[in-house]
């Protein structure tokens, strides 16, 4: 019984994690940016979704959609207000750009967290489940919503795969992650490709934030933790590798769920942390990393 | 001894003099804010030595600070050792931690190095929580001894500590060793080609940073009378330290102290705004990064140099 | 001129992954002599320097300094033993003054020495004055002209009285006057009984200075002797120029009637302080095949990067009616100026087919298929390997893929940068045929940069010679063969 519960819950959590992690790794692969405001973007999506669905009375579906759009807008803002100006700044030496972008996104994330808490609330918010009801899987009662979340997460990832591998823009994005100069020489504008990458990222993070709100609830204080989880998953899987992130998300998700059920809920993050330490020392490029 | 005659020295001396006289006409509340700010200043200066000079970005300065702080706190409350002994022990613990962190971490490049420093903090945090029996867990622990109950005396302790550390760190940065460190941080290949063992110097920089951070952490504990994860280990503190150093100007050492004081004081003044206060401070720091990447002091110093 | 052997390199070998950079390299360096190590790009000469200095670790062979085996030692120990290096690109500490930079070179590797002895300051001043930096001791590097930065590098290198001095590309970016001054400085090193090793790709610049010249190609030594002997050596000439320079009269080279497709006026490019291109004037007419020949470092790649919009430049570049200045690099590529860079810039983890498809990304599906069929016909091996990842292809196949991908863009002006670099002779034939076919079957204008003159000449209607960023000669291939055969190297 326990085992099945772990299997099911773990799957749902891992699917959510994978959605967030894939976005994080995509932006790193294409744009070279480790976005430390990642959690902030998810939080904005969750809060705006909650606000629209509940307080503004627009209903769950419309509210969720608006939440995702808010995530998209925040991602754009992150790129246009913070990342791009720093990357283009001539006052910063090229070797130092990375640390400045990191610090900048960190500050931006803090701004989002503080701003959201001030404007709305720092209590956890939830979005009503998109589907209500309970399903029995091998004798375990599971909210239908949980299943839906896993399905949605996979559907989105599937769409993403199609986009990257079957469309021209997607392939150009993939090319940009391998060789920015190469795509420029083939006539693709890097600035446009970056905008596309950040758009995809914004949608991914937005959906992850909204789904998380409907599953576990989200509060502005989670922002840092969310970034940290995504970061560790991505490093585990290999910076820049989407498939690596997917696998790592499930490894971490299951490790955490198993720990919570079998040992103690408070020790949830420990095993993945230990795993992270091991990986960083023994195989810093992660499971499937290239860079 | 050209420095003693330089403008910087006289300005700094004037600032210290004014600061020393503050308790005569300033409220206890402001004194306590400044006291905390001065310790924070030492945190920031230690960070700047590592980043600005050795070129290593430490995302978890609170690992070293926390090690020192908790070592001192535990020794004081469980073994009853006097404050000076605890502080010295804290320094040793922090340096040991620094070496432990530095040796493997320096073999890694780029984002991975920053990661290791971050993971170190997370591990310490969880460590403290797990061994709550000794450390007081998330709630924290109290220490029986404090430096003083008098706000002014505490203030002077902190100021003296800041000035001594600043003098030592600044002197180091301007010394021959400081020059080698800068070379190691800016261009490791060239430094090696000139005959310097870069790894040795970077590990040494870690140890120095650890020494000052750990000692400052211990001093802070004996000022506040309590130790908790939120005050000395949390990543958020580390973030503030980085912001302070970048705000003040990297590679200036003194700028980091200025940035720290500015940050802490600004935080206090904006406290009435509630949640908005973190927003405003972060916004200011972001603006500085975007428009004055050299930091406030760096910008002021270099304006004379350019053109 | 004591002539004692200072440095002994024996059977040195180094591979980077699957690429052999240095193979069976052996030579001696004596005190009081200047040896020039020359070779085209990819010959391994810079790698040899890195190995001696301990920046890279050799896979095989030994390096001995005065009998002490230093192979595998870390750089700083080798430096302390008496070897110093002047890197190709100056590496000053930007926040320190010139004097402080030189002082750094004199410091001991100690953790505890906080104060600098007064004598260090004195000595630093002496050294700086000797190389001609006496007037700028208290200035910061970013205020100095390029040549002074190079002087500072030299000052740092000789500060600790080294036995062996390694200098990588000593004259890159210097004007002829500055080259003379620098050469004199290097000569004084020899007079002080030091062993000097220079690395350069131009035999000419090194010829005046070097007592001995060693030529390398594809990681191995191919010739050794005096500068004249090496310049006349058959193998060396073949490697540099590709063989005997023979010109074929171009049929139908109707110069002067066709419209001008590409025009460069007074184009200059600066990399920091170094002038990479100096008032270059160039014209390419519709359907013409134009070659730019010159040694590595002459500026060919810089020229192409300027045309493609990848580096900022002064002057004017026009393509047809349009001025290319304000266009983004991607839009220049889309307008028909397609650049195949020396580094190829393939998407190595993507398949051959995917690379080609990306090249044809701006075409409609049917156009793309037609273009692809034509490219496969031109390079059948690409069709065979279309599902393979690009990085699994051989060097020649990768070059064909680069060319094929560029052709997918339906270029009006194709810019080819050193397509024969590092390729085996048999592949050159295939490439040559492919270019011939391009000429016959499509309306295509070609701008080709090559060091291998034998490859370039048969495909050229006109030839430009680029040397140290300047066009020093232009004309038709026949005249080139007559005038340049002897003086080229």
Image (tube, coloured by chain):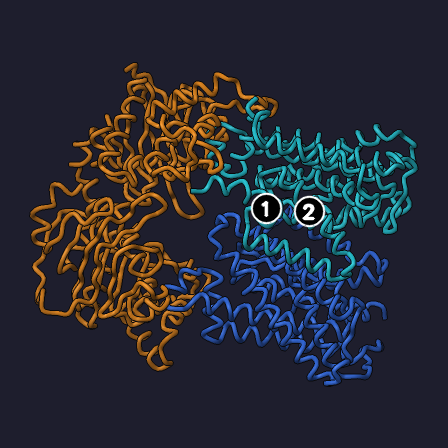
Q: Would you call the spot at circle 2 few (<14 residues within 10 Å), some (14-19), or many (20 or more)?
A: some
- The image position of residue C441, as x and y in percent, is 19, 72
First along the sequence among labels 2 and 1: 2
- Quadrant of res C436: bottom left
The residue identified by callout 2 is: B262
Percent across and percent down for residue A61 are 70, 84
Residue B116 visible within the image: no
Marking on residue C66: none
The quadrant the C terminus of chain B occupies is: top left
Based on the displayed image, in which of its 4 quarters is residue B10 positioned? top right
Q: Residue furthest front?
A: B25
Residue situated furthest top in the rendering: C2
Q: Is residue C307 left or right of residue A41?
A: left
Foreground of the two, C103 or B16: B16
Q: State which chain disc 1 sits on.
A: B
Residue at position x 41%, y 68% from top?
A188
Q: Is residue B290 above or below residue B19?
A: below
Looking at the image, residue C70 sits to the left or right of residue B281; the answer is left
The residue pinned by badge 1 equals B296
Q: Are marks 2 and 1 in contact (CB under 8 Å)?
A: yes
Give chain C's shade: orange
What secondary structure is marked by label 1? helix
Q: Which chain is cyan?
A: B
Dot 2 falls on which chain?
B
The answer to which of C353 and C136 lies nearer the viewer is C136
């Amino acid at each position: 019984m326990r085992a099945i519960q772990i299997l099911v819950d773990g799957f749902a959590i891992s699917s959510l994690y994978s959605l967030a992690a894939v976005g994080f790794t995509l932006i790193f692969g294409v744009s070279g940016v480790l976005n430390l405001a990642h959690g902030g973007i998810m939080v904005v999506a969750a809060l705006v979704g909650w606000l629209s669905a509940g307080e503004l009375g627009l209903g769950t579906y419309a509210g969720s959609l608006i939440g995702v759009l808010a995530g998209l807008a925040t991602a754009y803002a992150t790129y246009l207000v913070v990342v791009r100006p720093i990357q283009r700044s001539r006052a910063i030496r090229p070797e130092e750009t990375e640390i400045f972008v990191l610090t900048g996104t960190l500050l931006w994330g803090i701004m989002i967290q503080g701003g959201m808490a001030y404007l709305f609330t720092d209590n956890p918010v939830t979005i009503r489940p998109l589907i209500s009801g309970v399903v029995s899987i091998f004798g375990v009662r599971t909210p239908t919503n949980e299943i839906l979340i896993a399905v949605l997460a996979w559907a989105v990832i599937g769409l993403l795969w199609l986009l990257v591998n079957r469309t021209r823009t997607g392939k150009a994005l993939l090319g940009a992650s391998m060789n920015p100069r190469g795509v420029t020489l083939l006539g693709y504008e890097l600035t446009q490709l970056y905008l596309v990458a950040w758009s995809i990222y914004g949608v991914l993070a937005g959906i992850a934030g909204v789904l998380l709100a409907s599953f576990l609830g989200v509060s502005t204080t989670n922002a840092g933790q969310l970034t940290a989880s995504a970061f560790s998953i991505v490093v585990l899987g290999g910076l820049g590798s989407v498939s690596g992130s997917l696998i790592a998300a499930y490894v971490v998700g299951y490790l955490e769920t198993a720990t919570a059920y079998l040992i103690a809920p408070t020790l949830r993050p420990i095993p993945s942390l230990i795993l992270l330490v091991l990986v960083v020392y023994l195989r810093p490029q992660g499971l499937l990393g290239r860079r | 001894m050209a420095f003693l005659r330089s403008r910087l020295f006289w300005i700094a001396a004037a600032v210290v003099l004014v600061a020393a006289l503050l308790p005569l006409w300033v409220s206890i509340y402001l004194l306590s804010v400044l006291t905390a700010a001065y310790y924070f200043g030492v945190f920031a200066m230690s960070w700047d030595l590592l980043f600005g000079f050795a070129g290593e970005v430490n995302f978890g300065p609170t690992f070293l600070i926390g090690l020192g702080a908790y070592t001192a706190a535990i020794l004081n409350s469980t073994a009853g050792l006097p404050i000076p002994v605890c502080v010295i022990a804290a320094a040793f613990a922090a340096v040991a931690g620094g070496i432990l962190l530095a040796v493997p971490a320096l073999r890694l490049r780029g984002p991975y190095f920053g990661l290791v420093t971050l993971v170190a903090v997370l591990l310490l945090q969880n460590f403290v929580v797990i061994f709550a029996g000794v450390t007081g867990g998330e709630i924290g622990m109290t220490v029986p001894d404090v430096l003083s109950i008098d706000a002014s005396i505490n203030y002077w302790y902190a100021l003296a500590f800041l000035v001594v550390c600043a003098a030592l760190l600044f002197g180091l940065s301007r010394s021959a060793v400081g020059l080698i460190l800068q070379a190691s941080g800016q261009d490791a290949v060239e430094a090696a080609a000139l005959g310097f063992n870069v790894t040795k110097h970077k590990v040494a920089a870690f140890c120095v940073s650890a020494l000052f951070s750990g000692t400052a952490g211990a001093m802070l504990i004996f000022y506040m009378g309590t130790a908790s994860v939120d005050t000395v280990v949390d990543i958020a503190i580390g973030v503030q330290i980085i912001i302070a150093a970048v705000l003040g100007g990297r590679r200036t050492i003194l700028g980091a102290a200025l940035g720290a004081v500015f940050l802490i004081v600004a935080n206090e003044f904006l406290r009435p705004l509630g949640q908005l206060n973190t927003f405003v401070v972060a916004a200011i720091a972001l603006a500085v990064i975007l428009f004055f990447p050299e930091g406030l002091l760096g910008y002021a110093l270099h304006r004379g140099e350019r053109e | 001129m004591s002539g004692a052997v200072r440095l002994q390199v024996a059977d040195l070998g180094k591979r980077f992954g699957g690429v052999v950079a240095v193979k069976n390299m052996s030579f001696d360096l004596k005190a009081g002599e200047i040896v020039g190590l020359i070779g085209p790009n990819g010959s391994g000469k810079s790698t040899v320097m890195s190995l001696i200095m301990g920046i890279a670790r050799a896979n095989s062979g030994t390096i001995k300094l005065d009998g002490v085996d230093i192979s595998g030692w870390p750089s700083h120990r080798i430096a302390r033993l008496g070897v110093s290096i002047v890197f190709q690109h100056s590496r000053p500490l930007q926040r320190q003054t010139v004097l402080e930079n030189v002082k750094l070179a004199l410091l001991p590797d100690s953790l505890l020495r906080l104060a600098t002895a007064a004598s260090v300051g004195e000595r630093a001043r002496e050294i700086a004055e000797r190389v001609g930096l006496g007037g700028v001791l208290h200035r910061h590097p970013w205020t100095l002209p390029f040549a002074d930065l190079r002087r500072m590098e030299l000052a740092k290198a000789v500060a600790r009285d080294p036995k062996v001095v390694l200098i990588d590309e000593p004259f890159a970016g210097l004007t002829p006057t500055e080259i003379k001054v620098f050469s004199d400085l290097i000569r004084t090193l020899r007079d002080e009984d030091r062993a000097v090793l220079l690395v350069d790709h131009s035999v000419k610049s090194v010829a005046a200075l070097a007592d001995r010249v060693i030529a390398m190609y594809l990681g191995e030594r191919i010739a050794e002797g005096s500068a004249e002997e090496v310049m006349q050596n058959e193998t060396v000439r073949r490697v540099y120029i590709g063989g005997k320079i023979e010109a074929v009269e171009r049929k139908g080279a109707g110069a002067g009637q066709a419209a001008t497709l590409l025009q460069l006026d007074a184009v200059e490019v600066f990399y920091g302080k170094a002038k990479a291109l100096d008032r270059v004037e160039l014209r390419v007419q519709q359907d013409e095949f134009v070659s730019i020949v010159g040694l590595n470092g002459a500026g060919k790649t810089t020229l192409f990067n300027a045309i493609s919009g990848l580096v900022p430049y002064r002057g004017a570049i026009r393509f047809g009616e349009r001025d290319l200045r304000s266009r983004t690099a991607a839009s220049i590529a889309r307008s028909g100026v397609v650049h195949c860079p020396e580094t190829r810039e393939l998407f190595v983890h993507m398949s051959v087919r995917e690379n080609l498809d990306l090249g044809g990304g701006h075409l409609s599906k049917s156009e793309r298929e037609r273009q692809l069929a034509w490219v496969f016909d031109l390079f059948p091996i690409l069709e065979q390997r279309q599902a393979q990842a690009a990085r699994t292809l051989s060097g020649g196949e990768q070059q064909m893929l680069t060319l094929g991908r560029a052709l997918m863009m339906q270029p009006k002006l194709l810019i080819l940068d050193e397509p024969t670099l590092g390729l085996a002779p048999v592949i050159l034939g295939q490439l040559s045929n492919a270019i011939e076919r391009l000429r016959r079957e499509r309306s295509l204008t070609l701008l080709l940069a090559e060091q291998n003159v034998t490859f370039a000449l048969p495909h050229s209607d006109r030839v430009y010679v680029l040397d140290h960023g300047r066009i020093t000669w232009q004309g038709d291939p026949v005249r080139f063969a007559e005038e340049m055969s002897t003086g080229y190297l």
